[in-house]
Amino acid sequence: MKNTSLLPIAFLMFATQLCANDNSHYVDPTIGNVSKILVPTFPTYHLPNQMIRMFPVSKDYVDDQVTGFPMQVVSHRSPGIMQLSVGTGEVSNDPMTYDHDLEVRHPWHFSTYLVDDEITLSYVPGEKCAIYKIEFPDNELKNLHVKGRGPLMAEAIGPNSFSLEETITYTTRGTDPVTRVMKAYCYVELVDSSGNPVQSTAVESGNNRFSATVGKGDPSTIIAKYAISYISHAQARENFQMELGSKGFDDLVKQGRAAWDYALGKIDVKGGTESQKRTFYTSLYRTYERMIDINEGGRYYSGYDDKVHESDRPFYVDDWVWDSYLAHHPLRTIIDPQAEADMLNSFVQMYEQSGWMPTFPQVHGNHMCMNCFHSSAIFLDGYRKGLRGYDLDKAYEGIRKSVMEATALPWRQGLPKREIDDFYHEHGFYPALHPGEKESDPMVDKFEKRQSVAVTLGMSYDSWVLSQLAGELDKEDDQELFSGRALNYKKLWDPTHNLFMPKDDQGEWIDIDPKYSGGPGGRDYYDENNGWTYAWQVQHDISGLVKLLGGKKNAEARLDQLFREPIGRSRYSFNGEFPDSTGMVGQFSMGNEPSFHIPYLYNYFGAPWKTQKRIRMLLDVWFRDTLFGIPGDEDGGGMTAFVVFSQMGFYPMVPGLPYYTIGSPVFEKSTIQLGNGKTFTILAPGASDKNKYIQKAFMNGKEIDGPFFTHSQLVAGGTLKLILGEKPNKEWGVGAELPIK
């Protein structure tokens, strides 16, 4: 079989010396582990973009008991399968008490002390393999207990080896749900600290549980080496031999550290505070959690057709494109363009295998989640930034099929269009219901609702992407068709509110309170955020938005108002209705993805100094190096990619247009290794909490008069130098033109 694993360890060590500066010690996986309201970050232990992942399973960070240590986390946030617990004495499934202050926490190495049984448990991940090291007290029984979240089968293969098999099920939403079933296979060997086999004195299995007991007289340290496969038991054993073989715990620690040093060394920052560096490199680490490569030595299981495929390329899964298209994919396009190209190729393969372009591709198939079809954006953005090695014509076919033939109802992606979609295609907007009006379409999700304004705006953006892709592929008729549809957002602009507001199926305005109407998360009309957030969801036509707002000065004033507009109710009431809208500044929500580009809009409205002011404030207030350091759902790199860009001082404003807009860097020097032997450096001498306003800017020594530069300038290598001062230069960048339209 072909080997599609990570670079060999010897090369990794060499590459690390070339591009890393010991940045990995800044990473703290616990940053954000206590959430503001909804989902926290998880202290995930894994190699960059690799299949094996683990985080301890507990109720939350402040709980002092852990219920299990998974052999594998199948998808982001999921509690993990084949959960391991250990103990002395009688076999027990009781929670284990641990102490966070006694932990070792690195992306490549975790260790904790289980207080009650006085056991030290350590973990190190590989690619398709991992090792648990369990140090028991002397002269005690040593119990290893595995429980499945789904049906679990276990079998003893030899005196110190076992096979496990867990069934994973996923049921789609809608009126005709489909249950998908796949299996995960695990091969385990028990050895002592010298690598010698350790024989269990008792083995029990049944009722989705498996236990192995090692006697009192055996070595006190038990090492469980294992491999995971989604293909078969035989493939799990082959993964074991191919990756682990005679390697021990310390070997994987060194290999993992080298892999992370290499990944985190792709961006090196100087200056700033230690706190800012911890935030930066932990954010960068988060962006490597997804997508993950599930190619197992030249083959991969696909949940998109329930088949095993031969391939010498990585096959990537686990992504939430609604979150990640904004900054996560664009970041990877810079620091790992080959991986991004492989991911785009994986999307094309998923389309070929399933008949639909995925939006939330997971191991088991596409997860129907959120709204619209923003996979379109990552193809246009990647293609225009020079990525190749995938079938763009086939991708276009899949994207067009989604927009034209699938329903745009939220959480129903990959199902055929319905009457409400025919209305959209004819009239250019998604019709909404009046407050209290009964839903007539049984396919509408009872909680997610129609999201009529959010869908209309999102489909306008996707139509723009299609028009641009059609232009790249010389499809003139489609380019004209979708260019017109890209302007559909204007049909919901209500000048009396200066907001996008819902209309009914008669084309009449529905009178709502855009701050609070629409039920939980405003989902009748918007999605997770209210009308004030969605007022700015026109990244693809900012000049058109400026015209709707009455010109740049009015747009600037309206944006000021967004950050100052009061909530108007108690925080208790607001959070109860809009729990996703966290990190609030006025009506601006830092904790949710639709807001990421908003502070940068000042660059387009003639007031770049206000972008500089707002970005610095938002980073300083909402992204700290603490347990509370993430303002909302981080979504596996979706939010932290925004932090990586913004702390460096620039942002990919419009996925699909290959240029960047400038903010205010927190570091004096940020150097990006481009992988082609070149580097791109952002210099900001004297950058500090006060020294944040741009006075002048230079690209490769030539003065530039505005807050924009192109992707081609970045990948060519060079230096962007920003001269900062304590007070704003309100003239800099005021009349700047976009480098690409």
Image (cartoon, helix red, strand yellow):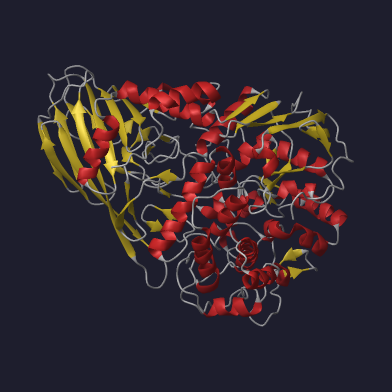
Give percent across and percent down for residue 449: 53, 68
**Of residues 664 and 144, the one drawn nearer to the viewer in this rendering:** 664
Look at the image and tell me whether residue 404 can be seen. yes
- Would you identify the image quadrant in which residue 77 lies? top left
Residue 409 appears left or right of 222: right
Could you tell me which quadrant the C terminus lies in? bottom right
Name which residue lies at 47% across and 49% down.
Answer: 343
Vertically, is 174 above or below 308?
below
**Of residues 296 and 140, the one drawn nearer to the viewer in this rendering:** 296
- Would you identify the image quadrant in which residue 489 lies? bottom right
Give percent across and percent down for residue 71: 30, 38
Look at the image and tell me whether residue 68 can be seen. no
Please count the marks in the image: 0
**Of residues 233 and 689, the one drawn nearer to the viewer in this rendering:** 233
Vertically, is 344 above or below 475?
above
Among all residues in the image, which is located at the extreme bottom? 506
Name which residue lies at 40% across and 41% down.
Answer: 59
